[in-house]
Image (tube, rainbow, N blue to C red):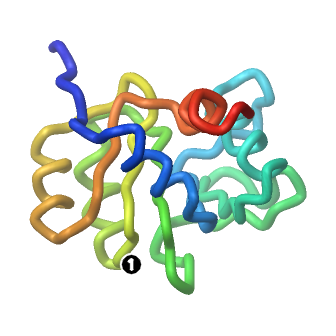
């Protein structure tokens, strides 16, 4: 399947990246994986990173939540590091928390989940890396 573009302009992405509270679904303990080093990059640049991973208690010295449902407070971005087929479930859970944006990392896309989120007024970014976009738009 060819993944279509998300249609967001650089200005749209800059606005999204100006938001600072990021819940990372599927954050990894493995430093070699993008699901670890991308949120680490964001954390080092002042983002409030909230890891979600049912198999970890702490990553980067941060308390890890077992599920999205455990996260409290306003969520700016739900960043998703899960396979595309898991995205609908993640999006349904995320929508209960009223995030401003759902960000699907590179290679991740699910058209029905995107449509569901958009119908609820949530901006969706897909098939993009937050770290690469941050470096491209803000110089890293």
Tell me if mark 1 has few (under 14), some (14-19) or many (20+) residues whose alpha carbon lies within 10 angstroms of its own. Answer: some
Query: Where residue 39 sits: x, y (%)?
Result: 69, 44
Query: Where residue 27 sits: x, y (%)?
Result: 63, 45
2 on left or right of 25:
left
Residue lying at the far top in this picture: please name it.
Answer: 2
Where, by quadrant of the figure, is residue 71 drawn? bottom right
Q: Is residue 73 above or below residue 111?
A: below
Query: Where residue 128 sits: x, y (%)?
Result: 43, 30
Placement of the C terminus among the 4 image quadrants: top right
Which residue: 30% across, 45% down?
A: 87
Number of marks = 1
Q: Secondary structure at mark 1?
A: loop
Placement of the N terminus among the 4 image quadrants: top left
Residue lying at the far front in this picture: please name it.
Answer: 11
Query: Where residue 90 sits: x, y (%)?
Result: 34, 55
Q: Nearer the viewer, residue 38 or 46?
A: 46
Q: Is residue 139 above or below residue 11?
A: above
Q: Nearer the viewer, residue 86 or 9?
A: 9
26 on left or right of 31:
left
Where, by quadrant of the figure, is residue 10 drawn? top left
Q: Nearer the viewer, residue 20 or 98?
A: 20
Which residue: 49% across, 48% down?
A: 14
113 on left or right of 133:
left
Which residue: 29% across, 50% down?
A: 124
Which residue: 34% across, 44% down?
A: 125
Q: Is residue 115 above or below residue 92?
A: above
Q: Which residue is disc 1 drawn over?
A: 97
128 on left or right of 40:
left
């Amino acid at each position: 399947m060819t993944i279509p573009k998300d249609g967001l302009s650089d200005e749209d992405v800059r606005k999204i990246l100006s938001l600072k509270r990021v819940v990372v679904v599927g954050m990894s303990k493995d430093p070699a994986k993008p699901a670890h080093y991308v949120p680490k990059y964001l954390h080092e640049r002042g983002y409030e990173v909230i890891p979600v991973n049912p198999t970890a208690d702490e990553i980067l010295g941060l308390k890890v939540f077992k599920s999205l449902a455990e996260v409290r407070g306003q969520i700016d971005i739900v960043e998703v590091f899960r396979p595309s087929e898991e995205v609908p479930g993640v999006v349904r859970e995320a929508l209960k928390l009223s995030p401003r944006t759902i960000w699907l990392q590179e290679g991740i896309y699910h058209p029905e989940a995107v449509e569901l989120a958009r119908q609820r007024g949530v901006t969706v970014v897909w098939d993009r890396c937050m770290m690469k976009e941050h470096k491209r738009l803000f110089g890293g």
